[in-house]
Amino acid sequence: MRVRHLGKVVVGILLMLNCSVNVVVVGLNRSMWDEPVALLVANLSVGDVLFGFMMVVIGLADVVFPPPVPQPVCVTLQYLVLGTSWQVKSAQLLVALDMLIAVVLPLHYHQVMDDWLKPMLIAPWIMMLINLLIGVVCSSLQLENTYEYGLKHGWLNEVGTDCRWELLPSVYSFIWEGGLFVMSTISGIIFIYASLVGVRQRRAIEERGESGTASSAFFLRRFKSMYKIAKVIILFIALDIIGAGMRVSARWYYIPLVSTAIHFVRIVSLGAETWVYGMNNVSLRRAFDTFCQEHLGFLGFARQVQPEQLMMRAFSVSKRPSLEGGRSVKRPSDNSWRHPDLQLDEVCDSRSRH
């Protein structure tokens, strides 16, 4: 039993270390603070780090306290970790929404995100507070917990001594997993819809022979990056939908072994999601490579490039003066949901046309 508790601690620590990379890279690189998607991914990663931290605390509580863990302590910790899961999944949904805007409204991306970025960063934490408020209300009403509900309906035979979510009110558990199910489903729909729209637009561009124009090339490069991410993330979202659906249906039919296995895979996938987002984003990849070179002494995922290539790439994302008030605005190429290997080609093409 103690090995299982230490397993929670180890998994939580690994999740914290893994997801903290994006937070550190974005936090140390001030130039990333102007990139909407970098901030959204960092916000998602902060939630993952907090989730991992709460897993560590729960695992240590199981080790430190003689079984069972005092119920007030366990219930408080479980509310915090499950509330964090709402922050993570709502942040994931908003990252998906950001990518949809980048594909559907490529030329208006920065204009839209300038208005909506702050609410999109705050919304996941509001969702976490809403989850905690629901938990407080359910506990104050002294509703039966999931163990009591399961024993009454015959799909549980004993009450565990670990600090587990089954100690929480059954109604709260139903609302919690139902919320995860809804958010994951919406995220999946957004990814699929964006992919279908992108494929349709890509075919139309190819049929019209407009792939060489600046606006079409900008869209195609951004869509290529998004499409790669969507194919991987949809698999993780499918696990969330299945896992949440099984937890919701557990009120009527419970399969402990399968439910536990899927739950473990869902936790592991949290760390993989942040890397899929980060390593398919040009700005985050560059910031990660810079961080590795400056602080760790080696090059990250980017290719070795010559100094003159770095200068040309820097030129390709430079700012140009606006005609209105002398204010600097970002060129369309500043949007970072695009393929990193094509930026140098864009600069060369623009120079050859002059």
Image (cartoon, rainbow, N blue to C red):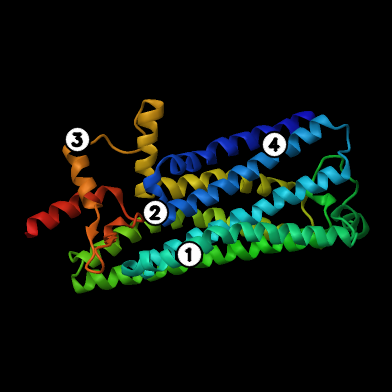
For the point 18% across and 66% down, the residue is 213
Viewer-side residue, 181 vs 306: 306
Label 2 secondary element: loop
Viewer-side residue, 51 vs 116: 116
In the rendered image, the residue lying farthest to the top is 297
- Tell me: 307 left or right of 178: left
- Whichever of labels 1 and 2 marks the residue nearer the N terminus, that label is 2
- Is residue 249 among what the camera can see? no
Kind of residue at disc 4: Val
- Tell me: 251 left or right of 353: right
Q: Can you identify the residue that label 3 sits on?
A: 306
- Is residue 133 among what the camera can see? yes
Q: Can you identify the residue that label 4 sits on?
A: 56
Residue 34, above or below 201 = above
Kind of residue at disc 2: Glu
Label 1 secondary element: helix
**Mark 1 packing: few (<14 Cα in 10 Å), some, or many (20+)?**
some
Q: Can you identify the residue that label 2 sits on?
A: 35
